[in-house]
Image (spheres, helix red, strand yellow):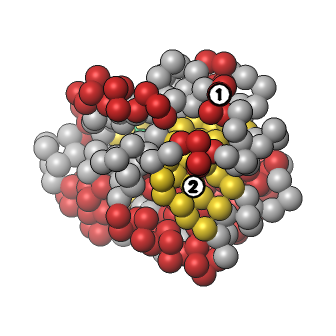
Amino acid sequence: MRKDLLSIDDLTAEEARELLSLAGRLKSGAAEHSLPGKTLALVFEKPSLRTRVTFEVGMTQLGGHAIYLSMQDIGLGQRESVSDVAQNLSRWVDGIAARTFAHQSAVELGEHSSIPVINALSDHEHPCQALADVLTLQERSKGLSGLSLAYVGDGNNVCHSLLLLAALLGMDMRVATPTSYEPNAGVLERAKALAEQSGGSVLLTDDPALAVAQADAVYTDVWASMGDEHEAEARAEVFRPYQVNSALFGLAKPTAVAMHCLPAHRGDEITGEVLDGPHSVVLDQAENRLHAQKAVLVSLLGG
Ligand code: CP
Ligand code: NVA
């Protein structure tokens, strides 16, 4: 594997499969304390529940330790340059998990540090989330190949990482967004190229019903991501037809699961009926953040 995990595109299909398989073994109790004495710095510019807790708990369970550093603590790029933060941390700790506004800040942390840097969410990608999500799907199905995942809503960081991972692993990925909120063109092109190699497929549409029809999983995320909150009101108008409610979800397979990375806004991108209903796997996704990230930590910081 490469030094850093900044994007799903840093992984080959084989590496992604190995990470998912290791995550499954770790979930069953294997390899506890495999990072004794190691320290992970969490460099976070934005709030977090799941990502912070699962990285901290993960390091503890692996026999190591995590230090949380908020903007108030270190002022990444303000009190001190990204490169100076990266070089200093490299002298003390064994890895960095970075949650940044600009993806470029995470890239720079990687470039200027001698230790692994893991993207814990940037404005461009959320690779740890996608790994946990696909682990959740893998646990429930015989294989990932040909499994259809419909993502409905904003073509954002979560959508980007899901697109790349689904395409890498031969899944049938459908994305429905309003015009002007499509995923990044470069990510889409890359996902299409990956799908061609893996036997998967990628569909982009502005029709949520088309994306969801007979899907195995229906995924959504907030309409306004952290940093876009000032657009929330305008976006609510545009995104209303993209709400995952019982009518839309009912178009998927009867066995379909409802997915969300959380935090969710009930009544906006998803109704409480679907989010809290019998088909929801959102808490399995949240739990699997722990196991997927432990696999990433063992792979990048171990040895
Ligand atoms: N899904 C996710 O990354 O949650 P947090 O923002 O709470 O970490
Ligand atoms: N797209 C959301 C995901 C939060 C986990 C955001 O970036 O705020």
For image coordinates 54% across by 61% down, the residue present is 203
Element on which disc 1 rests = helix
User: Please, what is the three-letter code of the amino acid marked with disc 2?
Assistant: Arg
For image coordinates 35% across by 40% down, the residue present is: 44
Q: Are marks 2 and 1 in contact (CB under 8 Å)?
A: no
What residue is shown at x 50% (from left), y 45% (from top)? 207
Q: Where is residue 171, by image quadrant?
A: bottom right
Q: Which residue is nearer to you in this view: 93 or 261?
A: 261
Left or right, 74 with reference to 13: left
Q: Which comes before the other along the chain, label 2 or label 1?
A: 2
| Rendering quarter of residue 87 | bottom left
Instruction: Quickly name the residue at label 1.
Output: 247
Disc 1 CB within 8 Å of nearest ligand 2 atom? no
Q: What number is the disc on residue 174?
A: 2
Image vertical order of residue 130 relative to residue 189, above or below: above
From the viewer's perspective, is 110 left or right of 205? left
Q: In this rendering, is residue 152 above or below 92?
A: above
User: Looking at the rendering, which quadrant does residue 282 occupy?
Assistant: top right
User: What percent of the width, then of the height, locates residue 105?
Assistant: 26, 55
- Look at label 1 and name its amino acid: Ala
Classify 167 as above or below 130.
below
Residue closest to the eye, 293 or 160: 160
- Residue closest to the far right: 142
**x, y percentage for residue 69?**
34, 38
Outermost residue to the bottom? 197
Camera sees residue 190? yes
